[in-house]
Image: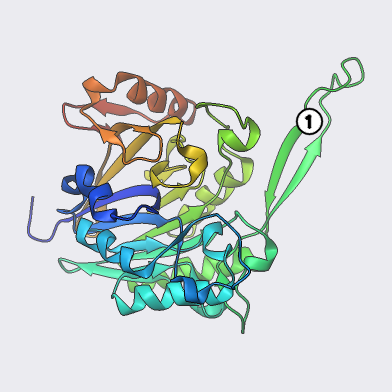
């Protein structure tokens, strides 16, 4: 270790709706607090009830403003806001969420009072190294997108096409083949521009993307499972790296998805849930992971993950690899088609970058 090293940890969807968030984070605080940069996908709008329409009956994520301090005491200092939960309770709440993070001096990205703010790369500097985050979401309705003069999130649209399988005439009712096609016009141009701006301003560029599907969206009664990485995820993850990103981190599927090394740079298709107080997760048992990243001399030198199990809403119980062999095996197995190699150690599992 050198004095210029930057240690970063990354976790996925995080929403604490319980009365004492400090108590919720206590079992995992030691894994977060010592990091120079600690990233989470803020899976909730942060706005007190007076910023919510009086007739709002939406039970989906919202967190009181006082709770954000517990995230910071735990060690989180970068929060992704490009996601669907930031739009569930209206634009006043979204703007307030941005204001709260600004007032608390938390680095954040992906939402704003207008499109320029939502797109703007967020930069956090530690130990003389600048790390930039470019944030996007492909999950949510078109109305949630920021425009030139209205609030919203940095949304990247994707089209869905259904193709009949070749044997559908002899087997009526066969499930269709699903194709997903990302926008290849103005939104791709904007992403390219934002990554290049980040590249010029920072040493390391990370693209944070809310994307993909969870098994529960396809199989509502599933206890756990795997959904194939969508075509657009693979296309745009690789495209982001071709544009200059050093790493792509995905979230939204609520369970781990494969890890790919593309041109020596990692694409983490899903960071899974960390803490998620949505009621539908109460009785589920899910796999979890905490990603560790060492940045040295302006480059990602080491990437690893700590496996865990999440019972219900969380937090996860993280263990040594030998104590969670099924989680380690599953992540290695799903990543093998991408050619990814791993080295299983005592404390974590290293992703081979070269």
Q: Nearer the viewer, residue 222 or 35?
A: 222
Which residue is tagged 1? Answer: 176
Q: Where is residue 36 drawn, in percent x and y?
A: 19, 59
Pick out the residue farthest to the right.
169
Residue drawn at x 47%, y 35% is: 257
What count of labels does the image hold? 1
Q: Is 142 left, or right, of 4 in this rendering?
A: right
Query: Tag 1's secondary structure?
Result: loop
Q: Is 298 left, or right, of 91 in this rendering?
A: left
Q: Is residue 156 above or below residue 164?
A: below
The crowding category of the residue bearing disc 1, from other C-alpha atoms within 10 Å (few below 14, some 14 to 19, many at least 20), is few
Residue drawn at x 21%, y 50% is: 32
Q: Where is residue 276 drawn, in percent x and y?
A: 42, 46
Q: Is the C terminus in the top left, top right, bottom left or bottom right quadrant?
A: top left
Q: Is residue 116 above or below residue 40?
A: below
Pick out the residue farthest to the top.
170
Residue 263 can be seen in this image = no
Q: Is 251 left, or right, of 56 in this rendering?
A: left
Q: Nearer the viewer, residue 307 or 236?
A: 307
Pick out the residue farthest to the front.
54
Q: Quadrant of residue 152?
A: bottom right
Q: Nearer the viewer, residue 125 or 19?
A: 19
Residue 11 can be seen in this image = yes
Q: Where is residue 232 drawn, in percent x and y?
A: 62, 46
Please name the colour scheme applied to the rendered image: rainbow
Residue drawn at x 32%, y 49% is: 10
Q: Where is residue 260 drawn, in percent x and y?
A: 43, 38
Residue drawn at x 33%, y 25% is: 328
Q: Is residue 149 above or below residue 336?
A: below
């Amino acid at each position: 270790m050198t004095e210029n090293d930057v240690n970063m940890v990354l976790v996925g969807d995080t929403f604490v709706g319980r009365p004492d968030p400090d108590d919720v984070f206590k079992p995992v605080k030691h894994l977060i607090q010592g990091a120079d940069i600690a990233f989470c996908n803020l899976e909730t709008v942060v706005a007190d009830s007076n910023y919510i329409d009086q007739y709002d009956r939406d039970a989906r994520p919202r967190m009181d403003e006082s709770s954000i301090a517990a995230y910071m005491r735990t060690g989180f200092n970068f929060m992704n806001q490009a996601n669907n939960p930031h739009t569930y309770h209206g634009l006043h709440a979204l703007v307030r969420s941005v204001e709260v993070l600004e007032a608390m001096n938390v680095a954040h990205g992906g939402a704003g009072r207008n499109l320029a703010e939502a797109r703007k790369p967020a930069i956090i500097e530690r130990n003389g190294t600048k790390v930039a985050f470019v944030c996007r979401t492909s999950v949510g309705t078109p109305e949630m997108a920021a425009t030139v003069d209205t609030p919203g999130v940095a949304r990247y649209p994707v089209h869905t096409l259904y193709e009949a399988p070749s044997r559908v005439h002899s087997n009526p009712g066969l499930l269709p083949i699903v194709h997903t096609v990302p926008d290849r016009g103005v939104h791709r141009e904007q992403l390219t521009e934002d990554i290049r701006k980040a590249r010029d301003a920072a040493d390391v560029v990370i693209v944070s993307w809310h994307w993909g599907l969870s098994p529960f969206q396809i199989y509502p009664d599933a206890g756990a499972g795997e959904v194939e990485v969508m075509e657009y995820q693979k296309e745009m993850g690789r495209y982001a790296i071709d544009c200059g990103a050093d790493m792509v981190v995905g979230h939204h599927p609520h369970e781990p998805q494969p890890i790919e090394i593309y041109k020596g740079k990692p694409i983490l298709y899903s960071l899974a849930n960390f803490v998620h107080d949505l009621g539908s997760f109460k009785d589920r048992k899910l796999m979890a992971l905490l990603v560790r990243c060492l940045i040295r001399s302006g480059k990602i030198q080491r990437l690893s993950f700590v496996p865990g199990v999440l019972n219900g809403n969380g937090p996860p119980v993280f263990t040594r690899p030998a104590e969670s062999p099924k989680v380690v095996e599953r992540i290695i197995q799903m990543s093998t088609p991408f050619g990814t190699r791993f080295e299983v150690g005592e404390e974590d599992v290293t992703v081979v970058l070269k």
